[in-house]
Amino acid sequence: MRTPHILVAVVVLFGCVARCGSPQTLRVTAIELGRSLNADNTVADSVARFGPHDTVYVSVLTTGSGSATISVRWTYAGQVLDEPKRQVSYKDFAATDFSLKSVAGFPPGQYTAEAFLDGKSVGTQKFRVE
C-alpha cells in the first residue's frame, strides 16, 4: 500500500522542479550610458550628455543563464550609425559593452542607443551631443 505515497511524492517532486528548479533564462535588467567602463564592463558614471569627440559607451546588463545575441542600434536623425552584435553565454549577472566613436566628431543633437536580445528590443537610452 505504499504505491500511492510514492506516486504522490513523484508528482510533487516533478511539479517543484518544473516551477522552482529550472534555471532562469537570460534577461536584460538595465541599459547604461557613459564615457568610461569599469573592469566588469559596467558603466563607470552614467551620463546622458556627451561632447562631439567623446566615446559613448553602453552597457547592457543581464541576469540569468543562457546563450543569446545582444546587439545595440545607434541612431541619429533617423539614420542607423552602427549596429554591432555579440553572441554571449552567461550563467549569472553580466555586462556586455558596446561603444560608439567618431574621429571627425559627432554632430550636435539627440541620439538613441536601442538594445536587443535575440532580435527583440529590450529598451532604449537617449543621449545628447552638445
Image: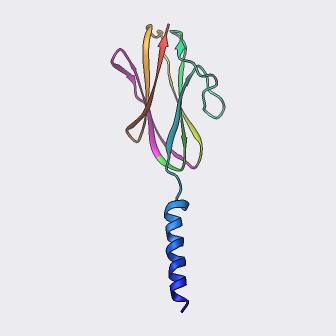
Residue sitting nearer the eye, 7 or 84: 7
Residue sitting nearer the eye, 44 or 53: 44
Residue 4 sits above or below residue 10 on the image: below
Q: Main secondary structure of the magenta part?
A: strand
Residues shaded magenta:
68-91
Residue 29, position in %: x, y? 53, 38
Residue 32 inside the magenta-drawn segment: no
Q: Residue at x 49, y 74 (%)?
A: 11
Left or right: 80 as drawn, with respect to 100: left
Residue 49, position in %: x, y? 53, 13
Residue 90 inside the magenta-drawn segment: yes
Residue 58 sits above or below residue 26 on the image: above
Residue 35, position in %: x, y? 58, 19
Residue lying furthest right: 39
Q: Residue at x 59, y 22 (%)?
A: 46
In which quarter of the view is residue 118 placed? top left
Q: Residue at x 44, y 34 (%)?
A: 71
Residue 30, position in %: x, y? 53, 33
Q: Quadrant of the N terminus?
A: bottom right
Q: Residue at x 54, y 60 (%)?
A: 20
